[in-house]
């Protein structure tokens, strides 16, 4: 029998108000393997109501930071207990090898929850000296209060890890939430919500409504009782959310796309740079916001590097990721498959040199070949637009100044990597990057204590670190008159 997933509202699994369902399709077999409730505006209203009640007068509203921290630590233990199950859910839903979520996503999720447990009682106010009020001394201080009910709207590429970026921080801050997972990947968010219940979070603190962005996502953005939207996804949806949120003065954090450069200088450790560039291109089939898809290589080593990267691409074993020895599964959905192939055709039309891979035409499953273009220019669409697939574009440069100019010539500004053994150059180039995060001799280091987010089209705001939890609070100032 096909598995069916329901919303999780106020601690109970419920169907959509009109009973509607949507299908979940395997990227490997293209078969429908499960269904999920297709959320309605009424479902969102019900979930927001539950979250609002807990926030205003529920048991949750009476817990202090250390009690919230204890619950977060318990939740982290339960996620650790269910590591394999959670990794399998995310892997099966998008056709990824379970090895990657076991090694990266779930440990990162646990780290996010444990770090946030420590922040929960550190969201402190300030005492601010002033000149007093009308000649009378005053005491002014601030407190940090939970921002309110949060709508957390999620992508499909790394579902559990990104859910915990948001959940850990907002729960530390004392908020409540309605989670809207991507339509392709509701499983791990629903499981996490049930683990919240098992950990002892009061029902109604964490709610999940499954369904489509233009209904459930939109209803969350429009709901008057949702104070903040925390969104990770495409710039197109980010713009739509901004348009709804702006007249309502709703707070937003937007974690959007990227076209991140990996700059390889001729003094770099060749093999380390090669490994880092392969990883930045092929992990999760390239469906990573920080994918290092623009590879800028100094001309002295460009030919050799391009040949070696093409060999690495050709060596990747593509197939059913559940089979031993397979390194890369299909991309997550049909639209993504078509998008990747479209960009590969554009790269060929624009005159880039195809060194590995190319347009894919599998019999079944959305498998694409790891693809490398060389001798490209930064003006080509394959260098400017986010492909979100295993496609790398190599561009040559001569000088450090040229590398910096090329790297920054992008509408995106999420991440960059610098490969060099020259310490001064590493500092100079890292300092010049117009991005939210730079890795020097390492591609995209992630850590629960580090801020993550982008500039320009890559988004607004930061997640991670204690500042990520502060972003779910409002600072209130209180002034007390102290007559002598
Ligand atoms: P998407 O924008 O299509 O969907 C993301 C979520 O938004 C889904 O839950 C979807 O249902 C919802 N949604 C879509 N339209 C909406 C609307 N009008 N109103 C409200 N909600 C709406 O993105 P995707 O394809 O799931 O994810 C891929 C994108 O996410 C890429 O651009 C990638 O770079 C980005 N991403 C960014 C980060 C980061 O940290 N910066 C991390 C992961 C993914």
Image: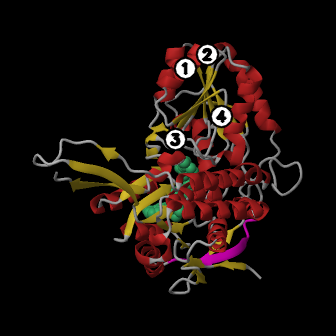
Label 1 crowding class (10 Å Cα cut-off): few <14, some 14-19, many 20+? few
**Which residue is the site of mark 3?**
385
**Was residue 31 drawn as part of the magenta stretch in this picture?**
yes
- Reading the image, the residue beneath label 2 is 423
Task: Please say if the residues under marks 4 and 2 sit with CB atoms less than 8 Å apart.
Answer: no
Q: Is residue 203 magenta?
A: no
Q: Nearer the viewer, mark 4 or mark 2?
A: 2
Please provide percent x and percent y for residue 232: 51, 54
Contact? badges 1 and 2 (CB < 8 Å): yes
Q: Residue 158: tell me if it is visible.
A: no
Residues at marks 2 and 3, CA–CA distance in whole angstroms:
31 Å
Q: Disc 4 or 2, which lies upstream in sequence?
A: 2
Residues under labels 3 and 4: Cα distance? 20 Å
- Residue 9 located left or right of residue 101: left
Per the model, the C-alpha gap separating discs 4 and 1 is 16 Å
Q: Which residue is mark 4?
A: 443
Task: Name the residue tied to disc 1.
Answer: 427
The part of the chain drawn in magenta is 27-39
Q: Residues within 10 Å of mark 2 (few under 14, many from 20)?
A: few
């Amino acid at each position: 029998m096909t598995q069916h997933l329901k919303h999780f509202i106020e601690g109970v699994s419920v169907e959509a108000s009109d009973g509607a369902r949507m299908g979940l399709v395997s990227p490997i077999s293209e078969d429908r393997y499960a269904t999920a409730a297709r959320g309605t505006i009424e479902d969102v209203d019900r979930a927001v109501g539950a979250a609002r009640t807990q926030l205003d007068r529920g048991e949750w509203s009476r817990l202090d930071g250390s009690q919230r921290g204890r619950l977060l630590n318990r939740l982290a233990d339960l996620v650790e207990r269910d590591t394999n199950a959670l990794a399998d859910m995310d892997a099966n839903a998008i056709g990824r090898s379970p090895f990657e979520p076991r090694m990266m996503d779930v440990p990162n999720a646990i780290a996010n929850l444990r770090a946030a447990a420590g922040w929960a009682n550190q969201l402190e106010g300030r005492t601010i000296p002033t000149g007093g009020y009308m000649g009378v001394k005053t005491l002014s201080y601030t407190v940090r209060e939970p921002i309110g009910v949060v709508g957390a709207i999620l992508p499909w590429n790394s579902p559990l890890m990104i859910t915990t970026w948001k959940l850990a921080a907002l729960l530390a801050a004392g908020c409540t939430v309605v989670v809207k997972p991507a339509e392709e990947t509701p499983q791990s968010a629903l499981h996490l919500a049930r683990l919240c219940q098992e950990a002892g979070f009061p029902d109604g603190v964490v709610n999940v409504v499954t369904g489509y962005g233009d209904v459930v996502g939109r209803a969350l953005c429009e709901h008057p009782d949702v104070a903040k939207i925390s969104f990770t996804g495409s710039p197109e949806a980010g713009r739509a959310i901004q348009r709804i949120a702006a007249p309502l003065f709703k707070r937003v954090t937007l974690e959007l796309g990227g076209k991140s450069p990996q700059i390889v200088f001729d003094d770099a450790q060749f093999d380390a740079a090669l490994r880092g560039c392969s990883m930045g291109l092929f992990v999760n089939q390239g469906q990573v916001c920080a994918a290092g898809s623009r590879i800028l290589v100094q001309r002295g080593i460009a030919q050799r590097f391009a040949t070696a990267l093409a060999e690495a691409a050709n060596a990747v074993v593509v197939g059913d990721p559940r089979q031993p020895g397979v390194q890369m599964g299909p991309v997550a959905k049909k639209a993504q498959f078509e998008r990747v192939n479209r960009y590969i055709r554009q790269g060929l039309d624009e005159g880039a040199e195809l060194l590995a891979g190319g347009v894919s035409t599998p019999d079944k499953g959305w498998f694409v070949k790891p693809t490398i273009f060389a001798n490209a220019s930064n003006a080509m669409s394959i260098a400017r637009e986010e492909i979100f697939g295993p496609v790398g574009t190599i561009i040559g440069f001569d000088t450090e100044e040229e590398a910096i100019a090329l790297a920054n010539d992008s509408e995106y500004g999420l991440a960059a990597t610098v490969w060099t053994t020259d310490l001064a150059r590493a500092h100079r180039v890292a300092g010049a990057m117009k991005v939210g995060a730079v890795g020097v001799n390492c591609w995209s280091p992630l850590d629960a204590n580090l801020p993550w987010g982008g500039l320009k089209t890559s988004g607004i705001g930061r997640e991670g670190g204690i500042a990520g939890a502060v972003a779910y609070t409002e600072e209130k100032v209180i002034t007390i008159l102290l007559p002598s």
